[in-house]
Amino acid sequence: MQIAVIGATGMLGQPVTRELIWAGFSVRIIARDVEKARRFFSDTTVMAGDLNNVESLVNALSGVEVVYLNASIRQNEKKDHFHTEDQGLLNLIQASRLAGVRRIGYLSSIIIRYQGMNGFDWWVFEVKQKAVQLIKESGIPYSIFYPSCFLDSLNGTQRLGRFVLMVGRPAVKPWYISARDYGKQVAKAFRLAQGEQNQEYTIQGPEALTQHEAAKRFVAAYKKEKLVVLTTSPFLLQLGRLMSQQADYGLHITEALNNYPEVFEAARTWADLGKPLTTVEQFAAQV
């Protein structure tokens, strides 16, 4: 099976792409920055393509059976900007029809369900919910994945030098999963997909932990250098939101992460795609 990946060089895109390669798929990476993608995947086909350019996507998708989209809204984006999961996705759907793509895979999020809870209203989650709707209405068979929190964030977006940054002390317990385990599940889903079958999977890891429990266990198990969990108040983000788009983004995503009442609902996912096994300690030893 020929699978194209858009977003292969990101924190989550890299491990998922590698799992697809190791699973035996013929992988083609579509990227705006071809040289950057080749630095990460020197033995994999890389083709130029831009979600803002339908023609470039049609060319890059020629001969592809499945396209997997690993996109995100950057912290400095504004509501009226071009979004990869809005107009970019519409362009991808159009190009997929023209190129004869038979399935669209998409990384969504379990946290977008917080939209509308406790009066929460954020345009970013509107875009992400619309993306799911666009895929479902496209007429192209789909595989949509709704993951919980990624362990990779502890060493990625929440890492600042020696500090693992936390905002507030939420009591909710996400089911943390590693991106490598998620990648294995994505590969298994594509192997199982049949014809016009649509797939939707909730992606959750082996255990539920508060964010501080996960951070403290990661810091304790990380051996490359001494790390420290640094907890800040949401009030600091509130002060900065009027001057910084990134602070506004951080405030909203933190509110959703700190309050979404996640429960376990991945039993069918585990039965179909396998149970993820990576613990916090094992993840810390891998990075």
Image: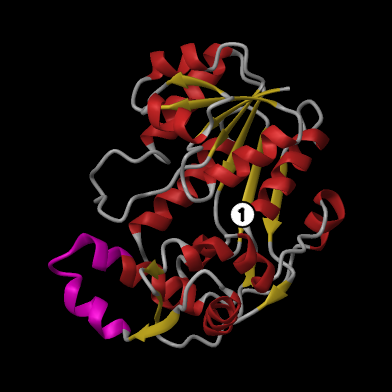
Task: From this view, report whether residue 141 is shown above or below residue 172.
Answer: above
Q: Which quadrant of the figure has residue 176?
A: bottom right
Is residue 120 at all visible to an observer of this figure? no
Q: Does the magenta stretch include residue 247?
A: yes
Relative image position of residue 56 (x, y in whole percent):
40, 16
Name which residue lies at 26% across and 67% down: 248
Q: Does the magenta stretch include residue 182?
A: no
Task: From this view, report whether residue 241 is shown above or below residue 30.
Answer: below
Left or right of 18: which side holds 152?
left
Relative image position of residue 277 (x, y in whole percent):
77, 63
Residue hosting label 1? 179
**Magenta span main SS:** helix
Magenta residues span 234-249
Task: From this view, report whether residue 29 is shown above or below residue 270.
Answer: above
Relative image position of residue 219 (x, y in whole percent):
53, 78
Q: Nearer the viewer, residue 201 or 209?
A: 209
Q: Which amino acid does label 1 sit on?
A: Ala
Left or right of 68: which side holds 269?
right
Left or right of 287: which side holds 54?
left
